[in-house]
Image (cartoon, rainbow, N blue to C red):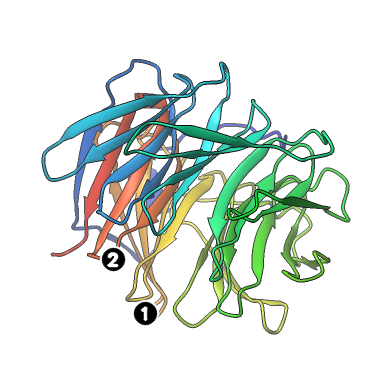
Amino acid sequence: MFLHKLCFFTLAATLAASSNVGMLDVQIREYEVPTPNSRPHDPAIAPDGSLWYTGQGANKLGRLNPKTGQFKEYALKTPKSGPHGLVADKEGNIWFTAISGGYVGKLNPLNGEIAEHRPADGTEIDPHTPVFDHDGILWFTNEETNYVGRLDPKTGKMTLAKSPSPHAVPYGIVILPNNTPIFCEFGTNKLASVDPSTMKIREYTLPAPGARPRRIALAPDGTVYYTDFARGYLGHFDPSGGKLLKEWLSPGGAESEPYGIAITKDGKVWYSESGVKPNTLIEFDPKSGAFSAKTIPSGGGVVRNMVATPDGQLYLACSGVNKVAVVSLNK
């Protein structure tokens, strides 16, 4: 795993790091999850608008109804599975990666049944972040085992491709408009894509040797933005040209550790700074180049991932403080 020195800054220092940082006017509402020390890792949105999260420390998945504030939790059948990432399919089933258990799981919320999928040949995997492509195929990164995986939900067939770079640490992943998965290689200064037909991986080296892209989000124009955790930058990359378009130092500076990221339909980029105490929620407007910042009320406890909803909200997992959050962006 990429090692880093954790350094915290106040919000005042954050805003002082840039001459073009405004105060972000959004509502952040946080909810304590039912099981103590759950360590909510990733959030997801289901077709009914509910917020789902992985309780990594509790070996559970959880569901929050944002309209009522009510929770429901689902215990996993395999102990110490370490649920990490999750995503809903069109039918409302919740697919999750068991990073410690070495499998990809599917939860049916209607009856609580869980199916587990592993490589047929017994290959060891540590599934990290899942995403569905346009054909309903589930793709997932594998952190330490260095694979990108492909799972066909209809057949259960799993296919793996190993990154060309040793200890690349495949991490955040999204699907491009042409149905190609693109992902971060957090152990290197590279992004990479995988051909959905051949499983061949193509790597893209970023200019800065010290860059460590961690999470990635798809913009409306088909380009991607990523958080450079090690250098404290937000990067903008063009997959069609295979090149970095531009990068910006995050408002919190070089040790702000940008992490979870999402992009709303209007093209605005949202991400968290995990090296700033309290953690901040950052808005970046690509049209104006302006940043705005707001502290997360609980401190965040490291927002490792976030997701944008169709109705103009963000769902956050605030892992270290045992909370999930709903950010209302409509002003």
Residue 321 occupies quadrant? top left
Pointer 2 with pointer 1, Cβ within 8 A: no
Measured as percent of width and height from the top left, residue 183 is found at: 66, 59
Where does the image place residue 138, in percent across and percent down from the top left?
Answer: 59, 56
Residue positioned 57% across, 50% down in the render: 130
Q: Residue at x 58, y 53 (%)?
A: 153
Question: Which numbered tag is attached to residue 288?
Answer: 1
Front residue of this view, candidates 107 and 145? 107
Please give left or right for residue 244 compared with residue 304 in the image: right
* Quadrant in which residue 203 is drawn: bottom right
Residue at horizontal 27 percent and vertical 21 percent from the top: 34
Looking at the picture, how far across and down is residue 198, in whole percent? 82, 69
Q: Quadrant of the C terminus?
A: bottom left
Mark 2 lies on a secondary structure that is loop
Q: Quadrant of residue 137?
A: bottom right
Disc 2/disc 1 C-alpha distance (Å): 23 Å
Residue type at numbered disc 1: Ser
- The residue where tag 2 is placed is 310
